[in-house]
């Protein structure tokens, strides 16, 4: 089995991509769903002061079970969370989706339920994540795909082609 992590900041296209891969018949998990993630009070990594805050993190017990399951040839997981690094060794590929900040904000505007990008502070947070989180994601990624001007089909094809070279000899990445 090959586990593939598709990560990136909000508005880079992770959820749309994982939905598309599911429609194509691939086993895929959107880690941003309540089933896989939860709000938890955490202390920032490397901090010795009490700066605890609520963060959206992966439910570790569920991810341990998910990534140990070898019933699928290739499993795609899309998400970005403070604790995802605990699982990096269980992914054969880490694919980072990026986009220009203005495109990320544009994509997030329809998410009225989350209020992302509808408020100046929320826009500021998106821009801050580009400065603070994106460099950390780049350090662990095997490949980076800019989604700014690409459609979901093109992005999926790039990822599936990449995964075909990662699979075991004789395996096919496509279902």
Image: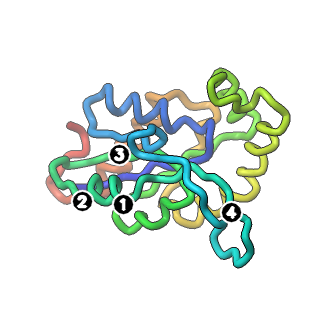
Q: State the image coordinates of residue 60 (x, y, percent, origin top left).
A: 39, 58
Say few, some or many: other residues with alpha carbon within 10 Å of mark 2 (under 14 / 14 to 19 / 20 or more): few
Alpha carbon distance from label 1 to label 2: 11 Å
Q: Quadrant of residue 121?
A: top right
Please, what secondary structure does the residue beneath circle 2 have?
helix
| 98 in relation to 26, above or below | below
Alpha carbon distance from label 1 to label 4: 29 Å
Judge depth for marks 1 and 2 and give the one in front: 2
Q: Residue at x 31, y 54 (%)?
A: 3
Q: Residue at x 61, y 46 (%)?
A: 9
Which comes before the other along the chain, label 1 or label 3? Answer: 3
In this view of the protein, can residue 144 be seen by the observer? Answer: no
Mark 3, residue position: 76
Which comes before the other along the chain, label 4 or label 3? Answer: 4
Mark 4, residue position: 52
Alpha carbon distance from label 2 to label 3: 13 Å
17 and 142: which one is in front? 17
Judge depth for marks 1 and 4 and give the one in front: 4
153 and 51: which one is in front? 51
């Amino acid at each position: 089995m090959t586990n593939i992590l598709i990560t990136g900041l909000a508005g880079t296209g992770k959820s749309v991509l994982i939905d598309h891969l599911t429609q194509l018949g691939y086993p895929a998990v959107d880690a941003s769903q309540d089933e896989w993630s939860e709000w938890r009070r955490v202390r920032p990594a490397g901090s010795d002061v009490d700066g605890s805050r609520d963060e959206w993190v992966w439910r570790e017990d569920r991810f341990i079970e998910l990534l140990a399951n070898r019933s699928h040839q290739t499993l795609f997981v899309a998400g970005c969370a403070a604790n995802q690094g605990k699982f990096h060794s269980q992914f054969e590929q880490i694919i980072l989706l990026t986009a220009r900040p203005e495109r990320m904000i544009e994509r997030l505007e329809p998410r009225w339920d989350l209020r992302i990008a509808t408020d100046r502070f929320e826009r500021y947070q998106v821009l801050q994540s580009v400065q603070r989180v994106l460099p950390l994601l780049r350090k662990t990624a095997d490949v980076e795909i800019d989604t700014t001007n690409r459609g979901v089909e093109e992005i999926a094809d790039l990822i599936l082609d990449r995964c075909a070279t990662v699979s075991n000899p004789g395996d096919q990445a496509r279902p």
